[in-house]
Image (cartoon, helix red, strand yellow):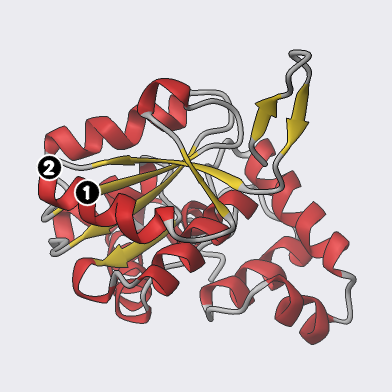
Amino acid sequence: MSQRPTETGALVSTGRIPVVVQAPDPISLAGVRSLLGQQPVIDLLDDVEAGPGTVAVVVNETPDESTLSQLRRPVRGDGVRAVLVVGVIREAELLDVIECGVGSIVWRHEATAHRLVQAVLAASRGDGDLPADLLGRLITQVGSLQRSAAGHSGVPLSGLVPREVDVLRLVAEGMDTGEIASKLSYSERTVKNVMHGLTNRLHLRNRAHAVAYALREGYL
């Protein structure tokens, strides 16, 4: 949540999510800032104010090298998460985007205020929010990589325990934390702890990266 100084200089929580917008042209920048600036849950900041807990909304038509560099920069910061708003993603670029730490992607033609806020909220929680067609493409692409490497080893690499696999299988099906908890008869806290534990242990950036890892290693 964002913090603002009081008259005495003390910081108090505003209860809103701090967001910065990065775009290659002034029209896109102004448009996205206008949509987000009207939302009561959003605290719109300038780039220089980005800090822990900030969500960076990165806008471009395609995730070119400049965009990937922008995406890597917030992830290297302390607790800054990224949302990508993009028109087209080619097959060769999808894993690059995921491995930059992006868990939330919005198609430009679907970038309404409601959809952008949904993605920002998911990113701030560390959840994934991929369009259904992109999730399918990610699963297909990583599955192809997995099959091409199948001859190197007959067993998956160590790393995931059965409970983590159960959770990731449901993440891959598009379920959120509450739905996973209900399906597995866990508490939501348990599901969050499972995801936090495996992503930290295996140095994975978010849910989408964890699903890609599990697919690549043959768990799903």
Q: Are marks 1 and 2 in contact (CB under 8 Å)?
A: yes
Q: For the point 21% across and 67% down, which residue is it?
A: 108
Q: How busy is the neighbourhood of tag 2: few (under 14 within 10 Å), some, or many (20 plus)?
A: few
Label 1 sits on residue: 30
Q: Closer to the camera, 48 or 34?
A: 34
**Residue 14 seen in the current view:** yes
The image shows residue 148 at horizontal and vertical percentages of 27, 60
Residue reaching furthest to the bottom: 183
Q: Closer to the camera, 166 or 144?
A: 166
Tell me the distance, in whole angstroms, between the alpha carbons under discs 1 and 2.
Answer: 6 Å
The image shows residue 1 at horizontal and vertical percentages of 67, 42
Element under disc 1: helix
Q: Closer to the camera, 185 or 12?
A: 12
The image shows residue 109 at horizontal and vertical percentages of 19, 74
Q: How busy is the neighbourhood of tag 1: few (under 14 within 10 Å), some, or many (20 plus)?
A: few
Label 2 sits on residue: 26
Q: For the point 59% across and 47% down, which residue is it?
A: 17
| Residue type, numbered disc 1 | Ala
Q: For the point 63% across and 45% down, which residue is it?
A: 199
Element under disc 2: helix
